[in-house]
Image (tube, rainbow, N blue to C red):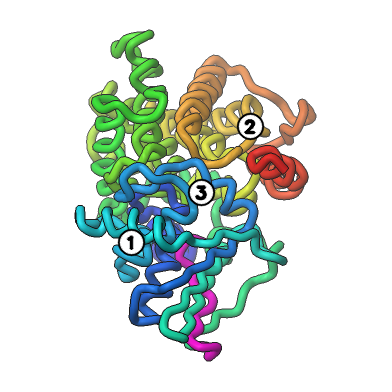
């Protein structure tokens, strides 16, 4: 792909936009970010605060540990952390630096002034509104559709900032519509490494570090550690699953280490990158080849997830795991034909796995997603494939990705509602 091709600049920009650092599960961190902005607008610590959120935010924030809060979980903990210790300028690393005194203050604040959490009427799928009050003054901050997309800031009823929202069914952003698997493969083969290596190298470093922490510490259900204890470390297929799961083990349980996200999700960032990194180490692959393989994997994950949306009843780890399969196929020397069939095979295996929020069991779903990706790759290597007309599989990789996108975005809406009802005992 030539640099003069409009896709070249678009693909580079997509990587820069999506591969960002975040500390903690991104939904509660988005709440903390909104709260930090609200306090900055108010100018003082609020005497009262209320958080209005969509059902999907409740689902993804209620059971995950918020970093730097002393092990607290939930929306109120995320809001309090943002109000007391948040640095709004750091966005998804808003509560990365919290002192011991601030941790105590968070606990004291929640004890003396409980934060009200309510389901937001007429909410979008991703919707957060933080309202804060102190000394007769009011502030309100709304984030919608994406984790740092501030769309409204008010003080005492006066609008300080407003951004128009896109139609809820708008789907992919303009640059993401240029993504195709063939185009991604071309870009991965030909891109100037200087244009992509900063984001990819940061992903390698950060995600590998938290995976190692997940394996050496006592985090969550220790899915990654269990895999290595049971099956050993000699098989790269086991290590690929274990390291991806271990990163999630740590992250879902409040580990205060950053992750480079993909499609707004730390778990997806871990899933799409760590298996490819393990295969690179097994093969002693050159650094440049690993970067290109991760370009292939990351952009494939974004291509898949863009059709589903930021939040859904469809488990995003499945998309990311299938994309990791594309990266594995690439680093093992696979051509476009092999990569296409790896993706289709992988999607056919686990599509429809539900997302029931962020919590320790995400690590096990990640391990399963990576296993499906490896199975899909090994099938493709053996010349075996799932064919169009078999279930939701369509003829051609792009048609199959579109089929899965339709399933995740439209077909699972009622499933999403029922999951939330079950989670809150409604």
State left or right for residue 366 relative to residue 270. right
Marks 3 & 1, CB-CB < 8 Å contact: no
Relative image position of residue 410 (x, y in whole percent): 75, 49
Closest to the observer, 97 or 280: 97
Q: Is residue 399 positioned above or below 393 on the image?
A: below
User: What percent of the width, then of the height, locates residue 390?
Assistant: 77, 26
Q: Which of marks 1 and 2 is nearer the N terminus?
A: 1
> Quick one: label 2, few (<14), some, or many (20+) residues within 10 Å?
some
Q: For residue 238, what is the image quadrant?
A: top left
Q: Earlier in the sequence, mark 3 or mark 1?
A: 3
Q: Contact, CB < 8 Å: mark 3 with mark 2?
A: no
* Residue drawn where x is 67% and y is 33% of the image: 352
The residue most toward the left is: 100
Residue 135 visible: yes
64 to the left or right of 357: left
Q: Closest to the observer: 204 or 122?
A: 122
Q: Which of marks 3 and 2 is nearer the N terminus?
A: 3
Q: Is mark 1 on a helix, strand or loop?
A: loop
Residue 156 drawn at (x, y percent): 50, 88
Residue 227 % position (x, y): 39, 16
Identify residue for label 3. 61
Q: Residues within 10 Å of mark 1 (few under 14, many from 20)?
A: many
323 and 387: which one is in front? 323
* Marker disc for residue 94: 1
Q: Report how far apart the C-alphas of labels 3 and 1 lie in the structure.
A: 16 Å
The label shown at residue 353 is: 2
How far apart are the alpha carbons under marks 3 and 2?
Answer: 19 Å
Indicate the quadrant containing the N terminus: top left, top right, bottom left or bottom right: bottom left
Residue 143 visible in the current orientation? no
Magenta-colored stretch includes residue 151: yes
Look at the image and give the residue range highlighted in magenta.
146-159
């Amino acid at each position: 792909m030539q640099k003069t091709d409009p896709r070249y600049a678009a693909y580079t920009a997509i990587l820069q936009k999506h591969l960002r650092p975040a500390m903690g599960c991104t939904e509660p961190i988005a709440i903390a970010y909104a709260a930090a902005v609200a306090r900055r607008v108010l100018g003082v610590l609020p005497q009262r605060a209320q958080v209005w959120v969509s059902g999907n935010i409740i689902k993804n924030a209620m059971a995950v540990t918020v970093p730097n809060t002393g092990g607290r979980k939930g929306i109120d903990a995320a809001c309090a952390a943002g109000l007391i210790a948040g640095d709004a300028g750091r966005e998804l690393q808003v509560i990365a630096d919290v002192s011991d005194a601030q941790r105590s203050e968070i606990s004291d604040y929640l004890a003396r002034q409980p934060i009200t959490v309510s389901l937001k009427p007429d909410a979008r799928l991703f919707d957060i509104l933080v309202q804060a009050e102190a000394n007769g003054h009011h502030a309100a901050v709304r984030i919608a559709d994406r984790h740092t997309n501030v769309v409204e800031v008010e003080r005492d009823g006066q609008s300080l900032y407003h951004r128009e929202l896109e139609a809820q069914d708008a789907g992919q952003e303009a640059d993401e519509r240029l993504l195709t698997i063939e185009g991604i493969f071309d870009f991965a083969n030909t891109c100037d490494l200087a244009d992509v290596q900063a984001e990819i190298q940061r992903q390698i470093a950060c995600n590998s570090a938290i995976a190692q922490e997940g394996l050496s510490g006592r985090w969550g259900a220790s899915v990654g550690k269990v895999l290595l204890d049971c099956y050993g470390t000699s098989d790269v297929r086991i290590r690929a699953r274990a390291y991806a799961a271990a990163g999630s083990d740590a992250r879902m349980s409040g580990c205060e280490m950053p992750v480079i996200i993909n499609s707004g999700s730390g778990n997806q960032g871990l899933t799409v990158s760590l298996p490819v990194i393990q295969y690179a180490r097994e093969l002693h692959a050159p650094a440049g080849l690993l970067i290109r393989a991760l370009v292939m994997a990351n952009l494939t994950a974004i291509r898949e997830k863009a059709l589903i949306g930021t939040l859904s009843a469809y488990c995003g780890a499945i998309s990311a795991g299938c994309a990791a399969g594309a990266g594995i196929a690439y680093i093992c020397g696979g051509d476009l034909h092999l990569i296409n069939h790896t993706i289709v095979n992988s999607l056919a295996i686990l599509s429809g796995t539900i997302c029931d929020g962020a919590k320790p069991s995400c690590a096990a779903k990640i391990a399963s997603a990576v296993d499906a990706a490896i199975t899909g790759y090994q099938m493709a290597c053996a010349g075996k494939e799932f064919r169009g007309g078999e279930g939701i599989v369509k003829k051609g990789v792009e048609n199959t990705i579109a089929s899965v996108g339709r399933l995740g975005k439209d077909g699972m809406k009622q499933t999403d509602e029922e999951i939330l009802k079950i989670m809150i005992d409604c």
